[in-house]
Amino acid sequence: MDIILASASPRRKELLGYFVSDFKCIPADIDETIPSDVSAEKSAEYLACMKAEHIAADYPDDVVIGCDTVVVYGGEVYGKPSSEEDAERMLKTLSGRTHSVITGVCICRGTKKESFSETTEVEFFELSGDEILNYIRSGSPMDKAGAYGIQDGNFLPAKSIRGDYFNVVGLPAGRLKRELDSFLNRQ
């Protein structure tokens, strides 16, 4: 039995490596459209399950971990920006405000599946227009939910964080370790 991370994210790979020494990464190429009946707060968990189930269909004897992270503000889901203009819109909206970062995680093996979501509240400093544009020009926000990476040293927008820092990076490592241990003990 192998452990498979259904992601190509180098950040998730690094975080999972903190407590799982041997695993494979197989990204799940799925349609990430969120159905209208899935709430903003459950959207990350929904996508994490879709990713895990997609990979598990080809690897039924292995344990598959699917993850997805979204930023939620005012009931709107901020995924990865579709353009530089979209990234600018997101960052201007989040500037000086508090938003939720929600990472959904799904662990499955064959037909057995468990999932959860972890939420962290992040308050941004007021961001200047130049600060936002320089960050966008770096290219870094284009592959990140909410158009920012909390770990990007060239852009430090967070005034405060309430909850799991690693969750904002993209994987709630402490909780996942415990959930994975429990899942494996029941196998």
Image (cartoon, grey):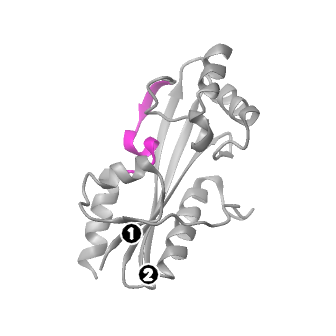
Q: Considering the numbered disc 1 on the image, is that residue within a helix, a strand or a loop?
A: strand
Q: Residues within 10 Å of mark 1 (few under 14, many from 20)?
A: many
Magenta extent? 158-172
Residue 164 seen anywhere in this rendered image of the structure: no
From mark 2 to mark 1, how far is it between C-alphas? 9 Å
- Could you say where residue 137 lies in the image, as x and y percent from the top left? 64, 26
Q: Looking at the image, can residue 112 be seen?
A: yes
The kind of secondary structure element at disc 2 is: loop
Which residue is found at the position 29% from the left and 80% from the top? Answer: 1
Give whichever of discs 2 and 1 has the lower sequence position. Answer: 1
Residue kind at label 1, given as amino acid type = Ile
Residue 45 point in image, percent of width and height: 53, 61
Quick check: 79 above or below 156?
below
- Identify the residue position indicated by label 1 in the image: 4
Residue type marked 2 = Tyr
- Residue at 39% in and 69% down: 4
Determine the residue positioned at 68% across, 42% down.
81
CB atoms at circles 2 and 1 under 8 Å apart? yes
Residue identifier under label 2: 59
Residue 117, percent from left and from top: 47, 57
Is 90 on the left-hand or right-hand side of 45?
right
Q: Quadrant of the C terminus?
A: bottom left
Q: Nearer the viewer, residue 93 or 140?
A: 140
Dividing the picture into quarters, in which one does residue 184 lie? bottom left
Q: Is 174 included in the stretch rendered in magenta?
A: no
